[in-house]
Image (cartoon, grey):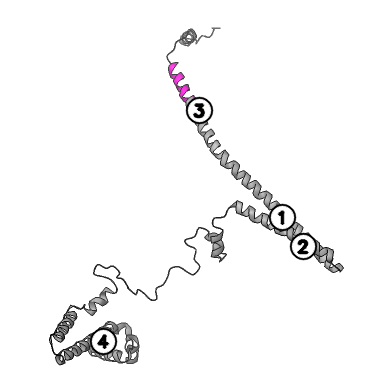
Amino acid sequence: MAKHDWKALQEEFLREHAATGITAQEWCERRGLKYQSARRYIKPRAAQNAQENMRKSAQRSNSAQNCAKGDGSGANNNCDADNTNDNNGSDPQQDAKLNGRDKKGRFTEGNPGNPNAVSPFVPGHKYSQKHSAYAKYLDADELFEAVADSDLHDELIFTRARALSVTKTMKRIMEDLKNAESVEQRIELYDKLLKAEQGLDRNVARIESIERTLSSLALNAIQIPRLSEDTHRIKAATSKLKAETEKLTAESRDVTTPLSDVVSDIQGMNDNGMLSQ
């Protein structure tokens, strides 16, 4: 395998890159070089640094020429200031290594970042929303935002409004029936009137259902605390009864009564108090 003079190739690439702006991969393909092997030696960043150094060298030489032509202390002061700025300037390679970060590794203000960053989120994602179970089937964010704070009272008002709208529609249909001239128009209007009545019946049934649900919720709001208090009271009474039973059992354990004496005597007999046959 032939060895390449990478230093000479790098200098040649720098010249062509400065003239045409060609990339390292395109240059390697034109030269018949494998880019995977050559990219360790053919570095576009080095070309950029070389261009920057050439630009600064040209600026310094122009400044030196201007200082040589100029007279007076003002020109000398300007030249000294330019030389000081050039000496204190940051190293281009060091700036390239920082890549938009300060010496502590934090991002500096104005860092361009990655222009082709890949986002982990797809368009229309619902990862941060709790209603994603329905939102992933219905792409209408404004609708979900509008109903986020609604409840059954809003449903009741909306259903009543629909019932009122159907009632107004039925009134207009009745007026059209009075003014209908042909039988076909009357049949069509009667069909619309029948459908409107059916829709009104459904709305009324829906209103009754919502009213019952709201009534049940109101009762639950009262009964749940009451049931909780009753449960607590029953548990307290059970604990008290258990404590009293244990106390009475402990107190009556050593008490002797005439009946207990008789029982003890009978248990002490050989035949356990049974009559001999």
Tell me the amino acid under the disc marked 4. Gln
Tell me the amino acid under the disc marked 3. Ala
Residue marked by disc 4: 51
Specify the segment rendered in magenta: 241-251
* Label 1 Cα crowd, 10 Å radius (few <14 / some 14-19 / many 20+): some
Of residues 75 and 216, which is closer to you in this image?
Answer: 75
Q: Is residue 123 above or below residue 205?
A: below
Residue marked by disc 3: 237
Is the Cβ of the residue at disc 4 closer than 8 Å to that at disc 2? no
Q: Position of residue 87 (x, y in %)?
A: 17, 80
> On the rendered structure, is 86 left or right of 166?
left
Residue at left 47%, top 22%? 244
* Label 4 Cα crowd, 10 Å radius (few <14 / some 14-19 / many 20+): some
Which quadrant of the figure contains the C terminus?
A: top right
Structural distance between the alpha carbons of marks 4 and 1: 80 Å
Residue marked by disc 1: 202
Residue at left 74%, top 54%? 201
Q: Which mark is residue 172?
A: 2
Location of residue 143 (image quadrant): bottom right
**Res 136 seen here:** no
Mark count: 4
Residue at left 84%, top 63%? 178
Give the mark nearest the N terminus, 2 or 1.
Answer: 2
Q: Where is residue 145 in the image (x, y as percent from the top left)?
A: 53, 61
Foreground mark, 4 or 2?
A: 2
Structural distance between the alpha carbons of marks 4 and 2: 83 Å
Give the overall secondary structure of the magenta segment. helix
Structural distance between the alpha carbons of marks 2 and 3: 68 Å
> On the rendered structure, is 149 left or right of 197?
left
Is the Cβ of the residue at disc 2 closer than 8 Å to that at disc 3? no
